[in-house]
Image (cartoon, grey):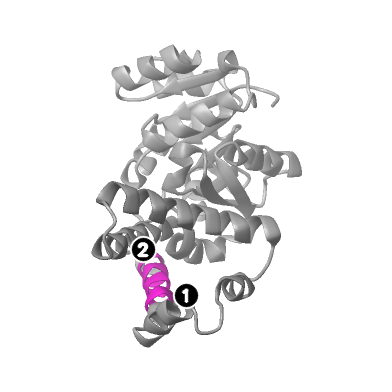
Amino acid sequence: MKGTLGFIGAGNMGGALIRGIVSKGLCNPKEIFVYDVSTERMKGLERDTGINIVSSGEELAKKVDTVLLAVKPNNVMEVLAELGELLKAKLLMSIAAGVRLQQYLDVLGEDARVVRVMPNTPALVLKGTSAISPSRACSADDIALAKRIFDAVGLCLEVEERLMDAVTGLSGSGPAFCFMFIEAMADGGVRAGLPRDIALKLAASTLAGSAELVLRTGKHPGELKDMVTSPAGTTIEGISVLEGLGLRSAVMEAVFAAFKKSASIQPT
């Protein structure tokens, strides 16, 4: 990676990104600068990764070529108001949920290079899924850099901004749905007699392995399901129950409800 990279915000997601970038060798730690309101968080990252910490957002913006904004959505406009002039010439990436590209451009100008990002919590263990939407002024190199950064913590895909609410409903909210499914599978194992700790490990590992099988083989989930399902066997009995109770419909409706909620939010 060419140039210097600065993080404004070093909470769970910001910290995960920094650790992922450093562990993958994407950027020399001495080329990374961090500012966070928590000195303790910054010092922890400095100790663990060797990155540089600074005393203000202004100092950071003056030092780096690319700024990654990892603050809460309700703090974005405050940061832009304070640092807008310094950020106009930078490549700005932001993981603030619900803040549209146009809101950044209204402050920084229509020619600003901004990449809106929707990551998800598995990035904390470098297994995240992120979607990026660049502004019109972003170059191919800008987009490639954003993809490399978020590929460091999992999978990164580029989408049109109009699809970001759908991304939020699926991969943004999706981990919570997956955790509920894991919990329910583990409860089923406990009901069948398994100790809780073993049931939970089996359930989580089964879901992780099944997801990896879809990604690696490229096969449709229905085809992979049929590979497990023998005539008159145990699996088809369980599938019959899931179908009868409306699992597919419930999951589809949950994703669509999360999408609609995201689309209805009016950022401030």
Instruction: Give how far across and how far down residue 7 sits, in percent.
Output: 47, 28
Point 62% across, 17% down: residue? 28
Labelled disc at residue 153: none
Instruction: Give how far across and how far down residue 242 sits, in percent.
Output: 39, 79
In the rendered picture of this protein, how many numbered marks are placed on residues? Answer: 2
Residue under label 2, please give it. 181
Name of the residue lying farthest toward the right: 140
Q: Main secondary structure of the magenta part?
A: helix
Instruction: Give how far across and how far down residue 64 sits, in percent.
Output: 57, 22
Name of the residue lying farthest toward the bottom: 244
Question: In this picture, which residue range is highlighted in magenta?
Answer: 250-262
The label nearer to you, 1 versus 2, is 1
Identify which amino acid the numbered label 2 is placed on. Phe
Position above or below: 131 against 68: below
Point 38% across, 38% down: residue? 71
Labelled disc at residue 235: 1
Point 34% across, 38% down: residue? 78
Q: Is residue 237 magenta?
A: no
